[in-house]
Image (tube, rainbow, N blue to C red):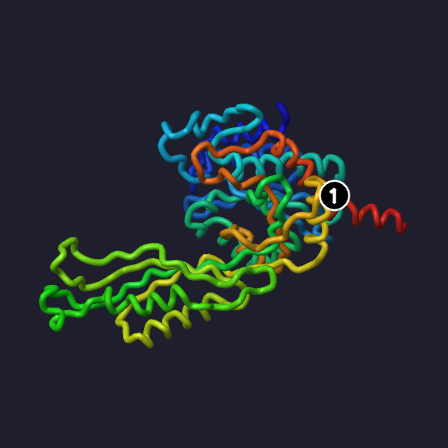
Amino acid sequence: MSEVLALTKELILRPSVTPDDAGCQALIADRLQRAGFSIEQLRFGEVDNLWATHGSGDGPVLVLLGHTDVVPSGPREAWASDPFVPEVRDGVLYGRGAADMKGSVAAFVIALERFVAAHPQHAGTVALLLTSDEEGDAIDGVRKVAELFRERGQRIDWCITGEPSSKVKLGDLLRVGRRGTLSATLTVKGIQGHVAYPDKARNPIHQALPALAELAWKQWDAGYESFPPTSLQISNFNAGTGANNVIPGEATLLFNLRYNPNWTAAQLEAECETLLRDYGLEFDIRWHRGGEPFYTPEGPLREAAREVLTQFSGAPPEESTGGGTSDARFIAPLGAQCVEIGPVNASIHKVDENVSVADLDALPDLYLALLERLLAQPLRDADAAG
């Protein structure tokens, strides 16, 4: 059994349903401390965060970013085997978190151990940042750590997130940015009454529908570089007492915007509220800013990632800003260039989540190649110059 498979299994055995880390970070901290890393455990509320660093204050700071928490497994009987007892069948590892993202976290650890052993005097600083709050509210995890780093003046130049980004084959996609996410809870107020006397009531459903139709079909923009156009999706609509002869007094709905760098959250909030007021609605709205969009232009990180993924997959990767969001949205505002590289994402959050053992075995070498390309090469160049 390979090192990375063994460590991934150990992590899956710990049922770290968000925000419970279930001892995953302690296991990793012990290993990295023995490898020479400085360890800082940052706990905020019920959330564990691990910051492990190796190197000097001079030179670039490269962070590997991941999470140890997982989503709930759902009914045990729906799985072919216990979701928290890892099992290999026909060359595939099954278990909650196998792909999202305990496999990547285990590969990070193995790559870091090998890197510092081979390059004890590497350039700059290499670090691992883990949280147990990525799959949950994402309040006391990397968001809070980023606030602490900002106060400290902690610089991060490059960030590699291990989110499962590959589509069909390991390394076939390089995530170079993510859209922003903005959620709203909208309550439209009416006046309750009898359906036979609509003149004595005000139906919030009828009032809201034209405005909602415009929000849903609005052409927000035409996209931004490799970003798709901004979109709004209504995900929930509730109104009424359950009776068919009562006009409701209010209607509540949820919607979310996924947006590109043409917008900020504040601009979108103002645009939506103006539209609702233009339709004469009486309403309350609560906003939740999940994170602003980020984008990594051409530079050392993107170039290195493209070269390494081409080497591992046999063809240049697709470079994309699609998908949902990740904790990199909190690191990018610190001035970091961010990319996401990880295993195939076909089974994430599903029953019988899994990862190919062959892909898992390749991940430490992939991450190690990136570390060497970014932090070992400058030393070799300096030695050659000397």
Q: On the rendered structure, is 15 left or right of 59?
A: left
Foreground of the two, 91 or 374: 91
Q: Is residue 352 above or below residue 314?
A: above
Q: Is residue 109 above or below residue 89?
A: below
Residue at the spot 18% in from the left edge and 62% down from the top edge: 248
Position of the N terminus by quadrant: top right
Q: Is residue 40 above or below residue 83?
A: below
Foreground of the two, 352 or 371: 352
Q: Position of residue 82 (x, y in %)?
A: 43, 26
Residue at the spot 61% in from the left edge and 54% down from the top edge: 176
Q: Amino acid at mark 1?
A: Glu
Q: On the rendered structure, is 234 left or right of 370?
A: left
Residue 367 visible somewhere in the drawing:
yes
Q: Position of residue 178 (x, y in %)?
A: 55, 56
Residue neighbourhood size for the residue with mark 1, other residues' Cα within 10 Å, grouped as few (<14), some (14–19), many (≥20): some
Element at label 1: helix
Residue 51 visible somewhere in the drawing:
no
Q: Is residue 277 above or below residue 15?
A: below
Q: Position of residue 318 (x, y in %)?
A: 63, 50
Q: Position of residue 242 (x, y in %)?
A: 16, 53
Q: On the rendered structure, is 242 left or right of 29?
A: left
Give the image quarter of residue 171. top right
Residue at the spot 48% in from the left edge and 30% down from the top edge: 95
Q: On the rendered structure, is 309 left or right of 27?
A: right
Work out which residue is located at the far right of the displayed protein and give it: 386
- Number of numbered discs: 1
Give the image quarter of residue 341. top right
Q: Which residue is mark 1?
A: 372
